[in-house]
DNA sequence: ACCTAACCGTATTTTTGATTACGGTTTCTT
DNA sequence: AAGAAACCGTAATCAAAAATACGGTTAGGT
């Protein structure tokens, strides 16, 4: 199999895995199920990914990369960092609360070795956070975004207000999956909070 | 077995289960392991709890009840609601991030039926939240706590800032268990945020 | 065209842990 | 005290899914 065909196959397999994951959840995902969905053999799955955890690790990477691409795309859509941030709220929430993201978090919770969790954290820290941190600092200079907070607190404040404990409640099934309306309402609520922590707009 | 002895035995079994849970985590807990730790037979475990999920449900209830008792105790220790709240931060965090609480959250994440998650949510909503909501409203009247926010937002703001996304990161092993120092620092950080959202103290 | 390696699809093995069963003992009831 | 019920400890069963093996087929290289 040629290299690019191999890449395509790999992508197809991982997409199939995510389909199974979204449909049946973390519990219901078996290697055979993925193989069947991808019209591949489990021998191939094991040859390529080593074991189930390896497959999941690849899924985590793929998901994080998709989020990163999406973020970069959003950034180009808006003129100012503040506008980008305002539009980012619902986008970020819908990605963090997608079925696949929640299922991957459940997988990480079930992995006692912590490798999946580390991968999740690493992707977030290296690819997602820096972009948002940069946006926040830009917006602070632009429009006084979160200007009433010490700069070092802005990140933590932003994520805390936007996400809060919603994620853990979704992961634990304490909360049903969030509808688009709920996501929009949360993002709007968060934005109002952010405004009260920003310097008043100049007339 | 007499009724009170039965209660004591039940408590001993659940304590043993929590010991196993704290030591070996959710993955490492097996019914046989619990039986051995409790010097009970698994036949008894099944007779009393039905199945593994039933045992976990009892653990969730027991844990929530302990938190409730602790909260009530704290409330009596301080003269004003504001003082109680200030002292509550680290206490609440240390309970939410205890090994047992994190492990129970992992169990709920792994339970696709959602029963454990519902139990967790129900306990939080019925026993923990109301007490804190009441405290917050008291403190607002007392000292203008969170007075810059609409009253309906105070709860969500309080939990979002205090807990944020730390819990989901611990549950997924993205973050190591929190030390007392980190917990204290987080509570202090949150308190400063709360103060900036409160009305200025009267001289 | 030939050969080898990778692949598919399925069957088989292994592992793990929940659940059930059972002989022997203790505890409760009457 | 006698019988029944609950308990202990361990062994046996069951189920699910991970991991492996294998015969037949396809794709790539020479």
Image (tube, coloured by chain):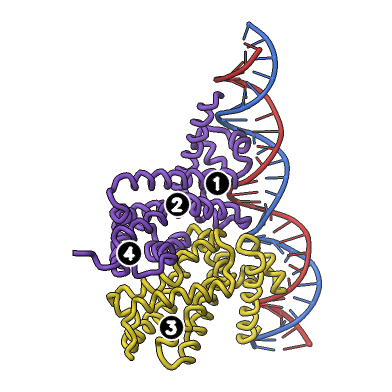
Chain colours: A purple, B yellow, C blue, D red
Lower sequence index among marks 2 and 4:
2
- Report the Cα–Cα distance between label 1 and label 3: 42 Å
Which circle marks residue A190 in the picture?
4
Decide if residue A164 is in sight here. Answer: no
Q: Chain of mark 2?
A: A
Where is mark 1, residue-wise? A56
- Report the Cα–Cα distance between label 2 and label 1: 19 Å
Is A6 located above or below residue B136 in the figure? above
Residue A167, image x, y percentages: 43, 61
Decide if residue B80 is in sight here. Answer: yes
User: Could you say which is closer to the camera, residue A154 or residue C10?
Assistant: A154
- Report the Cα–Cα distance between label 2 and label 3: 34 Å
* Location of the N terminus of chain B (image quadrant): bottom right
Residue B47, image x, y percentages: 61, 70
Q: Are marks 2 and 3 on the same chain?
A: no
Question: Around disc 1, counting alpha carbons within 10 Å, would you say few (fewer than 14), some (14 to 19), or many (20 or more)?
Answer: many
Q: Are marks 3 and 4 on the same chain?
A: no
* Location of the C terminus of chain B (image quadrant): bottom left
User: Could you say which is closer to the camera, residue B193 or residue B42?
Assistant: B193
User: Could you say which is closer to the camera, residue D21 or residue C2?
Assistant: C2
- Report the Cα–Cα distance between label 3 and label 4: 23 Å
Which of label 1 and label 4 is nearer to you? 4
User: Could you say which is closer to the camera, residue A95 or residue A32?
Assistant: A95
């Amino acid at each position: 199999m040629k290299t690019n065909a191999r890449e395509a196959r790999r992508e197809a397999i991982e997409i199939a895995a995510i389909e199974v994951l979204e449909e049946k959840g973390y519990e219901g995902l078996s290697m055979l199920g993925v193989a069947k969905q991808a019209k591949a053999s489990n021998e191939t799955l094991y040859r390529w990914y080593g074991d189930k955890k390896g497959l999941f690790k690849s899924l985590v990477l793929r998901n994080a990369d998709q989020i990163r691409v999406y973020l970069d795309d959003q950034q180009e859509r808006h003129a100012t960092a503040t506008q980008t941030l305002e539009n980012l709220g619902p986008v970020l929430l819908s990605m963090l609360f997608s079925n696949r993201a929640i299922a991957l978090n459940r997988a990480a919770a079930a992995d006692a070795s912590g490798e999946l969790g580390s991968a999740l954290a690493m992707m977030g820290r290296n690819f997602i956070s820096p972009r948002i941190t940069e946006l926040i600092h830009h917006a602070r200079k632009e429009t006084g975004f979160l200007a009433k907070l010490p700069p070092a607190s802005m990140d933590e404040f932003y994520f805390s207000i936007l996400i809060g404990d919603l994620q853990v409640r979704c992961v634990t099934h304490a909360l049903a999956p969030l509808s688009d309306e709920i996501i929009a309402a949360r993002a709007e609520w968060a934005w109002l909070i952010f405004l009260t922590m920003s310097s008043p707009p100049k007339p």
